[in-house]
Amino acid sequence: MIVTYNWLKDFVDFEYSPQELCDRLTMAGLEVDSLEEIGGGLDTVVVAKLESVETHPDADRLTVCQVNNGKETVQVVCGATNHKTGDYIAFAQVGSVLPGDFKIKKSKIRGQESRGMLCSEKELGLAAESEGIMILPQDLTLGVPVFEALNLRDFRIEIGLTPNRPDCLSVVGVAREVAALCGKTLQLPGAEIEDNDDNISAMANVVIENSDGCPRYAARMIKDVKIGSSPDWLVRRLEAVGMRSINNIVDVTNYVMMELGHPLHAFDYRFLADHKIVVKNATANDKFMTLDDQEHTLSAEDLMICDGQKPVALAGVMGGQNSEVQEDTSHILLEAAYFKPTMIRRSSKRHGLHTESSHRFERGADIDMIPVALDRAAALMAELGQGQIVSGVIDNYPKTLEVPVLDLSVEKTISLLDVKVTADQIMQFLSSIGLDTVKTADPDCLRVTVPSFRPDIEREVDLIEEVARLYGYDNIPVTMPVGTVNSGLPPKKQKVQNKIQDIFAAKGFSETISYSFVSTELLSRLALPEDDIRTQPIGLLNPLSEDQSVMRTSLVPSMLESVTRNLSYRNNDLRLFEMRPVFLGSAGDCHEQLSLVAAISGRREPEGWAQIDEAVDFFDVKGIVEELLAVFGINAPQYSNEDLETYFHPGKSSRIEVKGQGSIGFFGEVHPQVLQKFDIEQSVYIIEINVESLISLAVDHGKFTPLSKYPNVIRDTALLLDDAVLASQVVEIAERNMKKGVEEVTLFDLYTGKGVPEGKKSIAIRVRYRDLEKTLTEEVVAKMHDKLIRSICHQLGAEIR
């Protein structure tokens, strides 16, 4: 928001210097981004008189002027055509530096000496564009700096407002803050309305079909206006805040908007069909041409201002070409309305139109400012356009907005701010910015009525923040925050998660993080059964894109996408893992389940001259799974190739089962058909574990077993078994005897073929025996081993080879 120092003084009689004013505004929460002096450094540009103007002897388009600057007469060559002898002009003397770092030097132009420059408004920074040099009034004193003579010396203040302060998007709004800071009274601009014999109700009508989008719409009529240029004071004010002058009527709407903060719009009355205004939603796919010569395709969600037949304005954003004020306009229908901020924000974004009007409406305009702004603008239009204000005003206000009333605790205010303020001081602070504050029967409670120009104040803490601003942040004592440090062990869930991350990191894995939102197409690549709960993900009400429209039910698709992305960058040797929640159930009954997925692909060892060039296989991932489970005290997992997930290779995958818990996950090679859907051409192995189950099984504290001081004894035995018998069954029987002297059981050979009957297989196991208290004798070991082998043969139908 840009305001000027002098414009603020029109409403508040303060004595701050420009710099002091900026400092105080910044400390009050309105951060000043820049302070610029209008006309600063231009004291050498003075009022001068043209004693004579003659044509340049060697150039038809140039003139040679004799310029009287009050002290001497100097010669200047000029290229403008709008000046004549006797005119008073703005004269930049030699040595002047104009805006844009343009330095005035003594020179010769086509053989004629030129000692200065006759300035235009553009060259002095007073206008964006100008035609010819600046002609001044004849009653000015020669030699006086132009900005001083015309009373143009001012300061431009740019404030970086946060979106929650729409009340300060006006000169009056900022002036209200200044008045509160200096303890002065805010003087609002007045409006003198002189009605005539006509009545607006007979000339126009307003209908609101969407009262939710437009709670209030008011209008006035000004007739017999003359469209022309705006007076200098109005042009200067607009250009000082960065706006371009158009004509006297449009300039008034912009001026009042900057002054009072409420946007207005002027319609050419003759172009309004049926002399009627209808506020309603647009018809989808209709075309509408705005004032900037751009055609827009409307949406059914756009709020439009229409006449009896067609749209004439995109509500709160921009008017249409079909009703704009033109040079021959004589009757004006002036609009002042309030629109729902969210509707304006969406329309503005949808059509790529961000205007001064939409900037205010989408942040929340002041609905109670409508009649004030309407009368102010109508009075100025009648004055500057020499028109007449038609009697009466249309004020369609079908749905009155509620006025918030909040209770403020004095004790809580003192506690939060750590300052000693009384109830009377708080009332004074809040009343100074327009908040009606009264005492209640409870001495600790103040009742505050929040005005409509402060939509950001919704809670008690918002009021306390206002007290802090006005008390002065720099007056609040500095205190160090007090904190307590509570030492304690992390919960079991956190310890398990941290340990999992440590294990995978130690194995050379990199952790990935994927979006919780995925597409249904991505999930469908896993070819899950239709009745699987994971095929029915929870949809988002307002997804960012089609690729992020549902909540993920599995981490596998995102992990395979990460593999694809890495392979596309020729990163072929991969070890990745992710531990994040998945979301199962329905929108009304959703639960999170912590899941772990790891992927491994490519070479077993990093490339190098001493490394073996072998690819990872099923047993690499099996070893990782066993080490992971062993860390949490799960030493006897069972593996099964039944009821595997559809995205696993049926012959190279396994289900992980734990007694008493059932299945806790899967591992193995991804099915080639699934890899093809992800454009992956090399084998990928996946580990998928339900971390919630792992947490429930994990042993909190491992039990230390002392190392034996006695030697071990090893016995190897080859057994002949049916093909259907699993090797894990053999190991499981052997491990039951670990407390009876068996220290370790290892499967070290598997053989089928010559010498082994059809339907049979040979498995060789190595058993290590050791006692913690004594040395085992040959006789004892032989007896223990014989008992173990007989147990295996009896339970599994095995034979000793």
Image (tube, rainbow, N blue to C red):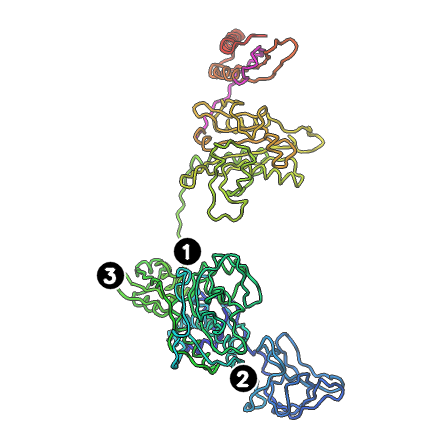
What x and y, as percent, mark residue 594? 47, 36
Q: Are marks 1 and 2 in contact (CB under 8 Å)?
A: no
Residue depth check, mark 1 versus mark 2: number of the one nearer the observer: 2
Q: Which mark is residue 442?
A: 3
**Inter-mark Cα distance, 1 to 3:** 33 Å
Q: Quadrant of residue 568?
A: top right
Picture disc at residue 148: 2
In this rendering, is residue 622 above or below 165?
above
Q: Position of residue 578 (x, y in %)?
A: 54, 37
Q: Is residue 565 left or right of residue 285?
A: right
Question: Which amino acid lies under the numbered mark 3 shown in the image of this protein?
Answer: Asp
The residue located at (57%, 63%) in the rendering is: 295
Range drawn in magenta: 700-728
Relative height, residue 487 to residue 246 (above, below): above
**Residue drawn at x 63%, y 29% as measured from the top left:** 616
Amino acid tagged 2: Glu
Query: For residue 495, which numbered disc appears in the image?
Result: none
**Of 234 and 714, the residue lying toward us:** 234
Which of 765 and 675 lies nearest the eye of the viewer?
A: 675
Could you tell which of marks 2 and 3 lies nearer the N-terminus? 2
Question: Would residue 206 be counted in the magenta stretch?
Answer: no
**Can residue 475 be seen here?**
no
- Give yes or no for residue 703 being in the magenta stretch: yes
* Mark 2 residue element: helix
Which dot, 1 or 3, sits closer to the camera? 3
**Amino acid type at mark 1:** Met
Rate crowding at label 2 as few (under 14), some (14 to 19) or many (20 or more) other CA atoms within 10 Å: some
Residue beneath disc 1:
480
